[in-house]
Image (spheres, rainbow, N blue to C red):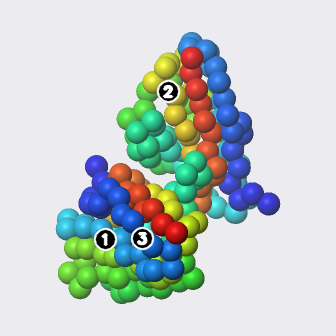
Amino acid sequence: DAKTTQPPSMDCAEGRAANLPCNHSTISGNEYVYWYRQIHSQGPQHIIHGLKNNETNEMASLIITEDRKSSTLILPHATLRDTAVYYCIVRVNSGGSNYKLTFGKGTLLTVNP
Amino acid sequence: DTAVSQTPKYLVTQMGNDKSIKCEQNLGHDTMYWYKQDSKKFLKIMFSYNNKELIINETVPNRFSPKSPDKAHLNLHINSLELGDSAVYFCASSLVGGELFFGEGSRLTVL
């Protein structure tokens, strides 16, 4: 029941920028976009999240289109350790101040030497 | 110090047995979760507790019973284990409305 669509896989050369797209055309006005990644056999790790404005932190940048129907996660200088499954998630309110993250299939990003 | 820790990391057991997985977080969070990741790698939320109160209970068999003795702990007890219960179970915690911090997972194999 994920509200997002992502390509199943992508490749990127080491040292280059990795741009991971995500479509979330049914997103509601107050729903945030979250990005997590899961490196093989590890627990998922939060990367970044945003509502309307573009966001940047030490790991990545998040570009959200003006109509909020899609977004792009940018890893500016991909390394081999960035090889992982990247999940784009629309955070849904599950009642009161509680929220639910529903993970989709994600994008397997493979960074090549 | 591990922020969200789960024990055991690996668990192999026979069908029909009862087993528990423990989870503890030292982040001071008030919300904790259990997720299940099956062989196809789908991550599905099972339960969520906020300050020891159940707030999310997805369509999970009654054989699964979460228990939260305090807000730093959320244990998962599974009765009458079935082959289909084999999966990796992830515990997570967050502040209300905040990002989730996941544990390293507990791989359950039912033979």
Q: Residue at x 52, y 34 (%)?
A: B87
- Judged from the image, the secondary structure of the residue bearing numbered disc 2 is helix
Give how far apart the Cα atoms at labels 3 and 2 are.
36 Å
Q: Which residue matches tag 1? A: A21
Do labels 1 and 2 touch, CB within 8 Å? no
Residue B106 position by quadrant: top right
The dot on residue A12 is 3
Looking at the image, which is closer to me, A20 or B46? Answer: A20
- Chain on which label 2 sits: B
Instruction: Describe residue B101's horizontal placement relative to residue B57 as left or right.
Output: right
- Which quadrant of the figure contains the N terminus of chain B? bottom right
Q: Residue at x 58, y 66 (%)?
A: A81
Vertical arrangement, residue A81 with respect to residue B45, above or below? below
User: Identity of the amino acid at label 3?
Assistant: Cys
For label 2, the residue is B85
Does the image show residue B6?
Answer: yes
Both labels 3 and 2 in a single chain: no
Look at discs 3 and 1 and give the one toward the viewer: 3
Same chain for labels 1 and 2? Say yes or no. Answer: no
**Furthest residue to the right?**
B1
> Closer to the camera: disc 3 or disc 2?
3
Q: Please, what secondary structure does the residue beneath circle 3 have?
A: strand
The residue nearer to you, when weighing A12 against A91, is A12
At a point 52% along the width and 69% down the height, the residue shown is: A113
- Quadrant holding the C terminus of chain B: top right
Chain label for disc 1 = A
Residue A4 screen position, x and y as percent: 28, 61
> Mark 3 packing: few (<14 Cα in 10 Å), some, or many (20+)?
many
- Residue type marked 1: Pro
User: How packed is label 2: few (under 14 Cα within 10 Å), some, or many (20 or more)?
Assistant: some
Q: Measured from the top left, where is residue B13 in percent x and y?
A: 64, 20
Looking at numbered disc 2 in the image, what kind of residue is underneath it?
Asp
